[in-house]
Amino acid sequence: MKLCLLSGISLVVSIYCLCVNTNDMYEYVFFLPLLYSVVSALFFIGISSKRTYRLSLLYYFSNAVIFIRYVATPFFTVYSDGLIKWGWGPDPSSKVMLQAIVLMSIEEITVFVTLYIAIRHYSRHTHALPQQRAIDARGEHIGIIGLYGVLAFLLTLAVKPVLVLPADVNSDNVQTVATRQAEDTAGSGIFVILGNTSKIVLFCVLLILCKRAYDRWRSGFFIFCAIVVVLVNVYFNISITRIRMIFAAVIGLYFLSLLFKRIPKTAYILAAIICIVGFINISLFKFSYALNGTNNIQLMTATMTAQFQDYFAGPRLVGQMIDMHSTYHRQINLSTFFNDFLGSVPFVSNYVDQTNRINYYFNSYNNINNSTLIAPVLGTGYDYFPAFPFFFTIMFEFFVIKFDSLMISTSKISYRYLYAYMGFCCAMCMGYSTQNIFAVFASTFIPLLALLKINDWIILRFANTTYNPVRILNSSKV
């Protein structure tokens, strides 16, 4: 039923794009949803006919993002084209746009092939495990990580509060806030790490405490406390980057459903309200320059749908990356490649030439002074590997399934949250740049994984320490 629904929707969108579009630049955009209807059907049929591990949250989130990229984005591109003229920088030619759609079509096929191979691979390696390990909140030691979370949060709050507090989207303008955040973040590598990891650690610790209390007393009060923890976490992840707030809501609700069997529908409604209100508020704030100071929801909706290409790497952005490669190919070299990754590593980034990175060249090509426009992963792959530009996409989609399988194989909330968070970022390769994903990997995933491993090692050392009694003269052993 779901397969028929997705294929049916994508076919309808393809017909809509073919019949309604009047812009020559998007003449062939209908092919993306049309191809999705065929390739996704083959993929889902292939997966359903095989024995796999229990596909979890990241698998479904990844498929949702893929659907948005190849079906929803073409629809909103054609739909919004008749309402508002939008787009940073020069328009690619029809020839370049055709090349971009061809590259996206091949990428679309490689994405589903990668997911299929990865699922088959990790299904063979997890066949001996239970379908999903139960959460063991009592067996998770939180003393060390809890102390770290409190101290790291308070230290960051005192020195760099912008790194842990919700963004103030009711004052100044988006450029002012973005500039202030960039200035506060620059040169503060240790506080970036402390801020990113402390919020995750505190969320996990509080959730573990709620679960332990509930298991002991079986009181609905502790379910209420867990719901409050999730909602507060969503609030603290409000920023000018809306997807971070959505991550927090989705992961939080996932854990609630996993830890407690009887979750009131009110929790889901409240989370949805916070996300919707926050999303609209942040959108009005971000698009204030286009709304002429008015809170016009209709104009904001038209602007937001037009920007689907910016957020999910639409064909226009891929076309611009192709043109950018022609303009800057002499500057793009091995140093650029290393700068792209080292430039996101705290401490190291202070010594990296930030003007020799793909995202900088992409924004310069579009006449944007600050690097706010995201360079698509496919376009970045084209700049580095023109013969095979799908390398990064394949790598990130493979990691999505790796983290998805790791999630169900651990009984610890902290590890499961960490795998989910990094898996979300990898799944967003459909919209993020390589810089975005590697920044999360370097400033959040690696430090937090190291913290959890150190915590496990210390606990294991204490657990293995035995008391050896000694005999004093003729007395009993003491």
Image: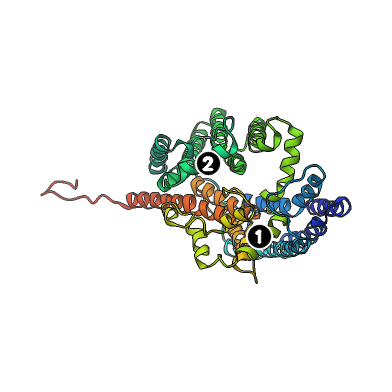
> Can I make out residue 317 in this image?
yes
Q: In the image, what residue type sits under mark 1?
A: Met
Total number of numbered labels?
2
Residue 258 visible: no
Disc 1 target residue: 321
> How was this image coloured?
rainbow
Q: Quadrant of residue 268?
A: top right
Amino acid beneath label 2: Thr
| Residues at marks 1 and 2, CA–CA distance in whole angstroms | 25 Å
Crowd tier of the residue under label 1, counting other residues whose Cα lies within 10 Å: few below 14, some 14–19, many 20 or above: many
Side of 60 relative to 219 (left or right): right
In the image shown, does 199 or 414 lie closer to the viewer? 199
Q: Quadrant of the C terminus?
A: top left
Residue toward you, 114 or 220: 114
Provide residue 366's location: percent of width, then percent of height.
64, 53
Residue 191 image point, x, y percent: 42, 44
Relative horizontal placement of residue 245, taking residue 294 as reference (left or right): left
Of all residues, the one furthest to the bottom in this rendering is 387
At which x and y percent is residue 379?
A: 64, 61
Which residue lies at the image location 72% right of the left edge and 36% below the top edge? 300
Contact (Cβ within 8 Å) of mark 1 with mark 2:
no
Residue nearest the viewer, comparing 317 with 388:
317
Residue hosting label 2: 179
| Label placed on residue 118 | none
| Relative image position of residue 362 (x, y in whole percent) | 61, 56
Q: Is residue 427 above or below residue 242?
A: below
Residue 319, compared with residue 83, is above or below; it is: below
